[in-house]
Image (spheres, rainbow, N blue to C red):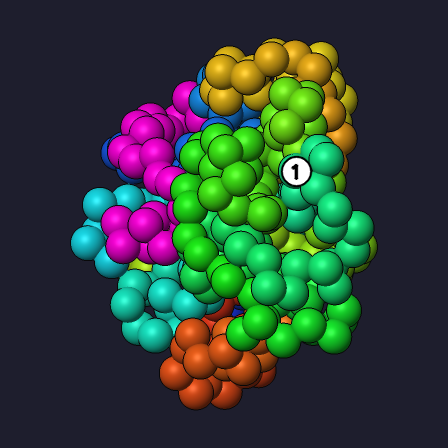
Amino acid sequence: MKRIIVPALLIFVVLGSIPVFAAPSGKVRLGYLRNDLHHLAAWVALDKGFFKDEGITVEVAGIFNAGPEEMAAFASKSLDIGYLGMAPSVTGVANKAARVRAVALANAEGSSVVVGKDSAIRGVQDLAGKTVAIPGYSTVQDFLLRKALGAAGVDPKKVNIIVIKPPEMIVALKSRQIDAFIAWEPHPSKAVTMGIGRVLIASPLIWKDHPCCVVAVEGGFYRKNPGTVKAFLKAHVRATEYIHKHPDEALRIGMKYTGMDEATVREAIGHVEYQYLGKQDDVKEYVRYLLNFGYVKPVDIDAFAREYLDQKILRDIVR
């Protein structure tokens, strides 16, 4: 029988074109935002054992009140992977405060501007001269509020924008310390089900299909552990699809991790789009906003978007 000899160079070229991932190893230190239903996929993966199915051990190393706090944990290398808003992660990376890559989307939409139930405020234009709470500067909600004000012809400088952590916003609204707030779900829905607030405008009416939270990986961890990142993303994709296929179980898990009632969580989940593929054009939109308000140092927007949103591993999974 004739032997077939394949040149070593050809073998190198062929194998070199195929992504090679080391086997998953060790532990992943995970972070997410407190009571943020945008991060439901993380909770589903933890609750249903999807991470363990992929051969990795995930330890919750931090539960944060807002994205900038979580970025500080990335900067101190206290986290390996985290769920947080695109805007604060972009801010941290652009300002070189932390090195992370967004390897997948966690959700789109899912925020609302809320006013008191009996408030005389009827439109965004009525927020001029009022006090409005946001979770933090350079957060997705900060961006959405300023975008809504601009569309309504209101100078953000004419609005008293203050920072209050979402768990405290409803109390502040009830006691009239603030006139309105913008937050992620389930806080807007909770204000409604408690009879304290009503939605003035939901985020899809500010920016339809806008990306919100991402799955971010610390830069060093990403380089050293591509196999673990791939395993994590497999669990994330599975959990995201599980939310769509098993809404009642996803509801139960959302109630478990937020401690909120069924009516609130059911209402809130209905306002969140759970998806995992992001778009570079959306990253550029955030960067332009952050540059406009001086939150980040000047960057090449196109180059930044290409490096920040790195979905090579994700696309290898879902293609």
Q: In the rendered image of this protein, does residue 260 appear above or below residue 64?
A: above
Q: In the rendered image of this protein, does residue 150 appear above or below residue 104?
A: below
Who is closer to the viewer here, 159 or 112? 159
Q: Quadrant of residue 80?
A: top left
Q: Crowdedness of circle 1 by 10 Å Cα count: few (<14), some, many (20+)?
A: many
User: Residue 119 in the image: x percent, y percent?
Assistant: 70, 42
Span highlighted in magenta in the image: 50-74
Q: Secondary structure at mark 1?
A: strand
Who is closer to the viewer here, 38 or 28? 38
Q: Residue at x 72, y 59 (%)?
A: 126
Q: In the rendered image of this protein, does residue 276 appear above or below residue 259?
A: below
User: Residue 198 in the image: x percent, y percent?
Assistant: 72, 36
Residue placed under numbered mark 1 in the picture: 116
In the image, is residue 70 part of the stretch drawn in magenta? Answer: yes
User: Residue 7 in the image: x percent, y percent?
Assistant: 48, 70
Q: Residue at x 66, y 38 (%)?
A: 116
In the image, is residue 81 part of the stretch drawn in magenta? Answer: no
Could one spot residue 309 in this view of the protein?
A: yes
Mark 1 residue type: Gly
Q: Is residue 246 left or right of residue 64?
A: right
